[in-house]
Amino acid sequence: MDLRAILMGLAFAAMWSSAFTSARVIVAYAPPLTALSLRFLISGLLGVAIAWWLGQNARLSRKQWLGVVIFGLCQNALYLGLNFVAMQTVEASLAAIIASTMPLLVALVGWVLLGKRTSPLGIAGLVAGVIGVSLIMGARLGGGADLYGVVLCVIGVVSLTVATLAVLGATSGGNVLMIVGLQMLVGSAALALPAVVLETWDVTWNWQLIVAFVYTTLVPGLAATLVWFLLVRRIGAVKAATFHFLNPFFGVAVAAMLLGEAIGVLDVVGVVIISAGILAVQLSRESG
């Protein structure tokens, strides 16, 4: 893994983790599904326009189109849609911690459902992840965290796992920025109907909402997704997923700094254990 890949991974982790804090601000002032659908529409159109300007096209292979649809539905519509709804009642730090368990779920699916051989280090990492999540969940639920919101976050991270497994199919063959834009438009279209049916246009306009929306649209929305696709193509999904072990730290830190969310001792212990588990799983897969 070269220096450029390391810098890309660090940038991705920081941008990705910050999305939970900006999303928490957005849902405080605007309907979540409507805001997210609009965000994807803007990000998607920008991505497609820049891709066209760079000479990329939408003539994708069948495998690429399948990856675009699966990624757009599972990550954008389901994972982020459920998280936006959940963060009306769940703190950004908790949502970030739940989402950060995705690499553990990817490894678990590979072990249990796909029959991939897992080393003792990988098994230890999975066990550590379960212990870390249990500590945090027990503390947060005991402290009054909304169970419904937590369940939505859990369903969301399962959807993110499916999306991650589809990344390689979507990125092979080039046209990366075009693919990023198209999968965002898929997410926007998928969220538009439930947004119209379930929500009313009740927006409290202020500078916090505007800044959070613009930031979410351009940085976690467009830039982070593009960096992730490029990183996977550069070093592979297994090595790229190693950077997810930083997400619990970044997610909790940003929420604490910008939103003033309280961080308990068990949160810190749980985050360290989860991060160690993710790193152990990825190192075991890399050496295996």
Image (cartoon, helix red, strand yellow):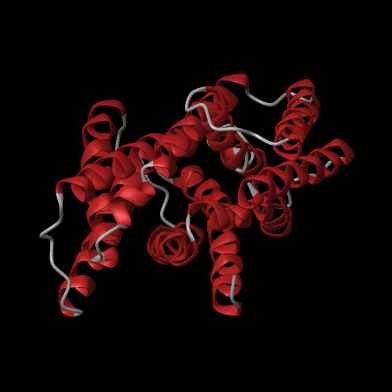
- The single residue placed furthest to the left in the displayed view is 59
User: x, y (%) of residue 218?
Assistant: 39, 66
Which residue is painted at 62% across and 57% down in the image? 243
User: x, y (%) of residue 170?
Assistant: 29, 51
Residue 229 shown left or right of residue 51 in the figure: right
Is residue 188 something that shows in the picture?
A: no
User: x, y (%) of residue 44?
Assistant: 25, 58
Callout count: 0
Which residue is painted at 59% across and 26% down in the image? 150
Q: Is 212 or 205 nearer to us in this picture?
A: 212
Residue 18 shown left or right of residue 192 in the figure: right
Which residue is painted at 28% across and 34% down in the image? 195
Q: Quadrant of the N terminus?
A: bottom right
Q: Is 228 or 75 nearer to us in this picture?
A: 228
User: x, y (%) of residue 136?
Assistant: 77, 32
Q: In this view, does 34 lie above or below 240?
A: above
Q: Is 118 or 178 nearer to us in this picture?
A: 118
Res 246 → quadrant? bottom right
Which residue is painted at 23% across and 33% down in the image? 196
Is residue 116 something that shows in the picture?
A: yes
Q: In this view, does 166 lie above or below 44?
A: above
